[in-house]
Image (spheres, rainbow, N blue to C red):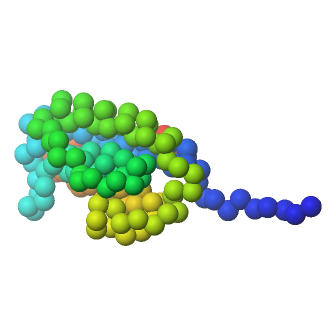
Amino acid sequence: MEQTVDDSLITREQLLKHWQGHRELTRKTIEAFPDDQLFTFSIGGMRTFGELANEIVGMAGPSLEGVVTGEWKNFSDARATNKQELLATWDKETERLNDLWPKIAPGRFQEEEVAFGQWPGTISWLLRYVIDNEIHHRGQGYVYLRALGIEPPPFWDRPE
């Protein structure tokens, strides 16, 4: 009998759960900001965390839409201007990701594309980039919160 080895590191369901765990933690980071600081406070000329969170929102849905359809439209230009709008948009995009994820065709993760006309690579690479970008910006948010005297949410406190 021939033995087969499953050398996959993570299933598609585990990857979505991993991503949504990061999104949940980033949402907690948004919630931790005082309303009057989310879109005004910055350090060293960096963008505010509200602007960074808008970027995360603007990348996630359009990226997954491109993965599913092969059409790489521009990032979303819908921009929240306050915490309530940002959290509502965040939640809407979270549901959009959950709806789109099952529509990813089998084998799609290893296909090569040029996302948004500028990022060549596999779909797997692109999704990891989007997740990494969120983690990077959440780290900036943690620095901002600490500078404001606020303890950020524990980075390990996310479902896995």
Tell me the residue at 51%/56% (across/down).
108
Residue at the spot 67% in from the left edge and 62% down from the top edge: 7
On the question of residue 108 being in view, the answer is yes
Quadrant assignment, res 132: bottom left
Image spot of residue 91 (x, y percent)? 31, 33
Occupied quadrant, residue 57? top left
110 relative to 158 in the view: left or right: right
Residue positioned 92% across, 61% down in the render? 1
Which is nearer the eye, 143 or 99? 99
Outermost residue, right side: 1
Task: Answer above or below: position of 105 versus 110.
Answer: above
Q: Position of residue 160 (x, y in %)?
A: 52, 44
Q: Is residue 154 visible?
A: no
Closer-to-camera residue (40/66): 66
Instruction: Name the residue at 28% across, 65% down.
Output: 117
Pick the residue in front: 94 or 136. Answer: 94
Count of residue discs:
0
Residue 46 placement, left or right of 74 = left
- Image spot of residue 66 (x, y percent): 37, 52
**Measured along the vertical axis of the image, is residue 79 above or below residue 47?**
above
Q: Classify residue 136 by image quadrant.
A: bottom left
Side (left or right) of 92 relative to 11: left
